[in-house]
Image: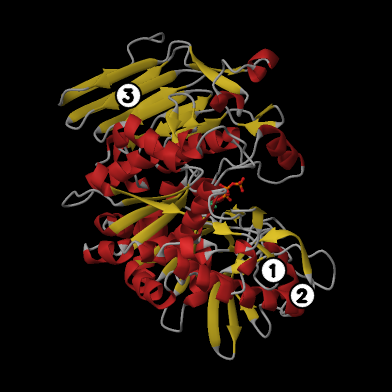
Amino acid sequence: MDMEFLNAEDRELVTKLIDAGQQHLFADWDVPGTEDEAKAAFLASLSKIDGSYPGGLVGYVSNARKLLSEAKAGGNPFEGFVPHHPNMVDLTTFDTTYDHYEALGQRQFGKVGVVLVAGGLGERLGYNGIKLDIPVEVVETTPYLAHYAACLKAMEARMEAPCPVPFIIMVSQDTAAKTLTTLEDNDYFGLKKEQIHILKQELVPAISNNDGTLALKKKYELILKPHGHGDIHMLFHTSGLAAKLAREGIEYLLFIQDTNGQVFNAMPAALGVSVEKGYDFNSIAVNRIPSEAVGGLVKLVRDGKELTLNVEYNQLDPLLRATISPEGDVPNERGFSMFPGNINVLVIRMESYVRILEKSQGIIAEFVNPKYADATRATFKKPTRLETMMQDLPKLFGPDEKVGVSIFDRRWSFSANKNNISDAAAKNEAGSPPESAATAESDFYLAGRMRLAAAGATVGEAAKELILGVPLIPGPKVLLRPAFAMTLAEAREKISGGSITGEATLILDGKDIVLEDVELSGRSGLVIKACDGAKVTVKGAFSNGGFELVRLTEEELASDAVPEYLRIRGYRFKNRGAVAYEFDQPGDYVVEAKTVAD
Ligand code: UTP
């Protein structure tokens, strides 16, 4: 190529890359005057990647060579380590310990930032749009992003000196534009624009061989691939945002995923655990069934040094067989694995986070997973790339950083919407969690029922239904919005007695609603919404047509006229006369069921 026509910056970049063994990128270039636009675009893309990766493209190639040579050698990453139970707190039952940690956590709300990683494509779900736009429930149709925003506002309302909770959203090329549009179109869901920080992850170049050769799609165009959700750490560092939030008094970051409507149920208690136990890194986890495709959280000990890590499920069984359990990952007396399951919800202490980011430049334990053409591991079936996962941060921890685990009831803390209906049905058939739109919605109502039951109300569940092979419990559908209650203690304060059974629906949204012996049975529905300052006491037995579950017909399932968020579930709810009260002026109100038929 003719370097004379390049500007000084491009010349420097090209020279650097040639020195790093990437001369093929510039071989066969057309003479000046031919394909100049394509060349300029190519140089611009190289320069963008060079600027976004710490250490630039040369650093990326050098990291790739090192990791590829280790992968080729095929060493055991856990050589010499003996697995132990991690430090953990069991919060699977709602007891006094749970209350203690929730109360402690709630007092920290003013020192927490919430980090949503939302750069994933969602290929398994196959939804035409961003996952954050999908409603978590379709009685009132609340998108995930609206639900998360409501949780942040509810946290703010519970602070002694209310201030907006920083909300950090990581997007990617695949999700950036739609996420911004959704935020703007919905007036930031009631949040302040300034409390939202958008970080955008970039794609990284694919690599075609063990020498770290960058792969070309065609002349003047690299193959680019996602780098994984671990990019959040790099972006926190390169943007300076972690250090800035730390200076502003943020002491903890809660990391959440795009479609887990349950996450804020566990958040207050998990935060309390982080504070009391002094955990720098606290994984919100669940009991794990042996052999299920969920990573296990394991304390690995070697030469007196310990490291608590997520061990991928395919590595866990061999590690156990080679060390403490010749039978592998066998169930304990309760049927669970010896090691809790990672659901990738993390509470990270800011002070240690900023320190680790400084030390690592935010590059968190990259790994490479090439598919080799044969046993010689000399060539790949297709280009690979470096990846990084947010849960691997503790790989950079030293003896001073404390890692722990908080175990929660699974469906209280985690129920994602990751799979399309047919894959979800197949998973259900195989006995695995379907993790679909319908099961996520079903669990969203379950969490409401769990709060009601914890507050002493009688709860009777409807029978499970299978819709297109995916299980759904159609009621009672209980939506206790975050404004109403964020902790069990709050639910207990506001609810006394009463019962809810069958396919009934109860929706409460507002800080000062109180339920006294409210009864809902059959399919009856009751919706109460109260603005700040509206104190509403609700009493009696309500009876009406409520919300009916209606399955979509074959034609509807195939029709573009039916919203896709319904088609990924296979049903909708029809309002058949649920009673609704909305109070938009402060004051004292009583809602009392007058007669059997409202
Ligand atoms: P998922 O496991 O749900 O992956 O990611 P995905 O990429 O979204 O979906 P599939 O695998 O294509 O079906 C867990 C979380 O990590 C985010 C996702 O948005 C989700 O919240 N993520 C994933 C990123 O932010 N960036 C990535 O590069 C990958």
Measure the C-alpha gap from mark 2 to mark 1: 9 Å
In-front residue for pair 303/537: 303
Which is in the foreground here, disc 2 or disc 3? Answer: 2
Label located before the other in sequence (3 or 1): 1
User: Where is residue 517, by image quadrant?
Assistant: top left
Q: Where is residue 262 in the image (x, y as percent from the top left)?
A: 47, 44
- Which residue is disc 2 drawn over? 321
Measure the C-alpha gap from mark 3 to mark 1: 48 Å
- Which residue is disc 1 drawn over? 316
- Which residue is disc 3 drawn over? 528
Give the amino acid type for the residue marked by disc 1 in the picture. Leu
Q: Position of residue 482 (x, y in %)?
A: 34, 39
Residue at mark 2: C-beta within 8 A of ligand 1: no
Measure the C-alpha gap from mark 2 to mark 3: 55 Å
Residue 411 vertical placement versus 399 (above, below): above
Residue at mark 3: C-beta within 8 A of ligand 1: no
Label located before the other in sequence (2 or 1): 1
Give the amino acid type for the residue marked by disc 3 in the picture. Ile
Residue 125 vertical placement versus 76 (above, below): above
